[in-house]
Amino acid sequence: MPTRDQIRALLEQGHDYPAIGRRLGVPAGQAYLIATGMPADGSDTYTEAERQRPGALPSAQYLLGAEAENPTTKEGVLNWIKSRVAADAQMQAAAQQRDAEPGEIQDPDDDHDALVVLTRDHNQVKALQEQLETLPSHATGGSAAQMSRRKSIVDMITVKLSQHEAVEEEYFWPAVRQAMPDGDRWADEAIEQEQQGKDTLTALGKLESDTDEFDDLVEQLVLLLRKHVAYEEKLFLQLKSVMSDDERRELGEKLLTAKKLAPTRPHPHTPAKPAVLKTVGAAAAAVDKVRDTVADRPAKRRGRPKKSS
């Protein structure tokens, strides 16, 4: 029988309950019960204290049984859809115009709370990640257009993460170190995770999307993203109790201002220190913007396939 610590460790690594259940040989609902001490079918009646338990989900009832059959996974249905699209010029034109950019979602009050600002970044990256995972890859028989779209979306993630992590290193992690008794531990672990992300993104930027190595690194990136976002959002809950509303708002405004001048590419060899980022980081950001202007960067396609020459 799996232990609670085993399951929670896998959650920290970015795995979801169905994946954990398969890995440990138990139903997903049972894995949830072991991790949280709560049945998956009772999520509608959880108390607020129960909802804050590690591993708890807003709704876990989907873990109890087999997922509903998705007809769009059937080959016959897919072939029918493809034939309809091929015969419909308007649908083809719409597909060409659609891009992967999730857009900047603002709260009604235009909240500048640092935790809101960073969560918006997380949500944008999650949206891109979800689109990336739905596209067939080289390993799964994706077309040239689909692989081209994957390359563009990975580069869009690269832009957003490079900006996000640069402003965190400049302002957010120093604030965490100061605000929390164990802030150094939180910040050091986060920066180590971010370094792994930078290394992975740098490697992906050098590869074409029609290779097994690219696919392997995309899978690695997705796991790193899930783990890091879960880590940061766990930290956000604690910061609410140690930083005042005004402190978080002031910090958020610094993040928003710095993001406009942040690098758009990973710089894995630049030390993650504020004093360094204000000098070397600023120079790197300026070079990035020049390269973005003159180069045919995949992110510019906003998730669209590369046009045939």
Image (cartoon, grey):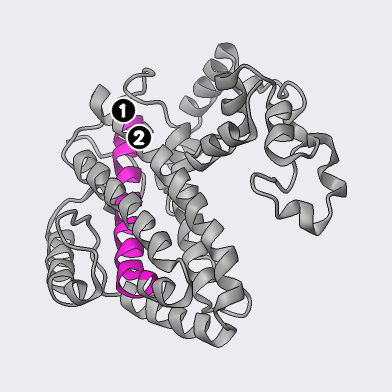
**The disc label shown at residue 220, or none:** 2
Hey, what amino acid is under mark 1?
Asp
- The magenta region covers 145-173
Residue 189 higher or lower than 72, as above or below: below
Placement of 106 over or under 226, stated as above or below: below
In-front residue for pair 133/226? 226
Residue 210's x, y, as percent?
Answer: 25, 26
- Secondary structure at badge 2 equals helix
In this view, the residue farthest toward the top is: 76
Q: Can residue 94 be seen in this view?
A: no
Label 1 residue SS: helix
Q: Does the magenta stretch include residue 109?
A: no
Residue 143 occupies quadrant: top left
Circles 1 and 2: CB distance less than 8 Å? yes
Crowd band around label 2 with a 10 angstrom C-alpha radius: few (<14), some (14–19), many (20+): some
- Tell whether 238 sits left or right of 232: right
Question: Which residue is at the front of the view, 163 or 43?
Answer: 43
Disc ID at residue 216? 1
The x, y position of residue 181, in whole percent, is: 48, 71
